[in-house]
Amino acid sequence: MVAPARRLTLIPLVAATYFMVCGGPYGLEELVAKSGYGRTLVLLLLTPLIWSLPTALMVGELSGAIPEEGGYYAWVRRALGPFWGFQEAWLSLVASVFDMAIYPTLFACYLGRLFPSVATGWPATLLGVGMIAICAAWNVRGSRAVGLASLVMTFLLLAPFVLLVLISASHHAVTPPPVASSGWLAAILVAMWNFMGWDNASTVAGEVENPQRTYPLAMLITVCLVAATYILPVLACRRAGLDAHDWETGAWVDAATAIGGRALGIAVVLGGIVCAVGMFNALVMSYSRVPHALAVDGFLPKFVTRLHPKSGAPWVAILLCAVAYASSLGLGFDRLVELDVLLYGLSLLLEFVALVALRLREPALPRRFRVPGGLVGAIAVGVAPMTLLVIALIQGRTERAGAIPTLLLGGILISLGPPLYFLGSRFKRPVIAARGRLH
């Protein structure tokens, strides 16, 4: 087993979860541009309540009750059987390919604020590949190394925004120009993406110290931290009277320069680089445990189960994920967000179903934390997030992923899950030993 000194404790887990979900205000630029300050602030207040908090409560109960490596895959497999467990893993892994392509793009975008020649074209692609390679190597060192790095990077990326908020608060308020909103549906989709990923920390449950206590507490602390770090900087820019029409990816640099001068703008650029690396790094840790768990169950070749002899990290799974993420570089932001929300939302639906199924099938399962309200509460907690998912599907009907409508492309990817399961079951490698955790 991994020695206790190598395990994730509460604060590093909060930091890693923060990067899996948020990584600072970076990424809100599209929301402000689409909606203006008023509607953005409404969405940033409501989305944590109807999307993040219910999901965090579900994750808190299931992570504490079933602290197995593979997280959400293990929950759904136990509650609904191996077929649905495989679908959960498939949806999550496919969603991760689209999700993870966003962060190297952000990395190149913010570095381009200092060196414009690297922001587009082949230099941006090379930067993205280099970032992916560094994060893969970092993850091979183990989950504790990723968690501690996330803690340091959280302080580094948030420091400029703390200064931005304080400087803005010390000046007189200025009314910003009004913005013609592009509509609620498009804005809700971006808001959902900015608050996604609460279940990602569950996949390293076998490497967390006292997971029954640590997970619920980490989820609640992170919900509050994410909400604060989104809302306060947007309020500061609104108070400074900055024009929302000028917002685009990377606009935090202009906002910081306008409020606090060039030095603060450069600090925000550096924070954006830290954000992209920190989010990608933490998510590689999360997603790589899913193919490892599938390999342990016999659905993937045995070599995917190999662990690093010193860190215990699933190094083969990490490398396979890194190659997949590098292959998706170059897709547009809106297209990536739409596909990511659709696929992630369906995997989240299976997790909420698993929560209810386990309450019915295993009422005596030890649960240090429970979603309040008994069985009714377990059912009700998933209603609001799934309602938002339906809204995302409505938006996806009219959007296109290249030549194919987003909803159709998503449907094609989803439909591949069942045949892949039956194909994998036919050639499945026998699992002689009981399924173990990552040691």
Image (tube, rainbow, N blue to C red):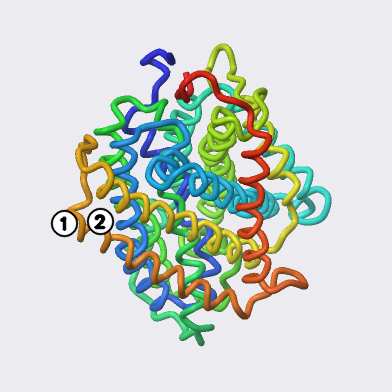
Specify the quadrant of the image occupied by residue 136.
Answer: top right
Q: Is residue 359 left or right of residue 439?
A: left
Identify residue type, mark 1: Gly
Q: Is residue 327 above or below residue 297?
A: below
Look at 62% across and 71% down and name the residue there: 407
On the rendered structure, is 146 left or right of 67?
right
- Would you say residue 182 is visible in this rendering? yes
The residue where tag 2 is placed is 378
Q: From this view, report whether residue 6 is shown above or below residue 220.
A: above
Q: Residue at x 54, y 31 (%)?
A: 297
10 Å crowding of disc 1: few (<14), some (14-19), many (20+): few
Q: Position of residue 51 (x, y in %)?
A: 36, 62
Label of residue 373 in the image: 1
Q: Are marks 1 and 2 in contact (CB under 8 Å)?
A: yes
Q: Residues within 10 Å of mark 2 (few under 14, many from 20)?
A: many
Element at label 1: loop
* Percent position of residue 192, x then y: 46, 64
Front in this rendered view, residue 213 or 295: 295
Q: Residue at x 54, y 37 (%)?
A: 290
Measured as percent of width and height from the top left, residue 179 is found at 49, 84
Query: From the image, which quarter does the N terminus lie in?
Result: top left
Which residue in the rendered view is the most extreme toward the front?
A: 426
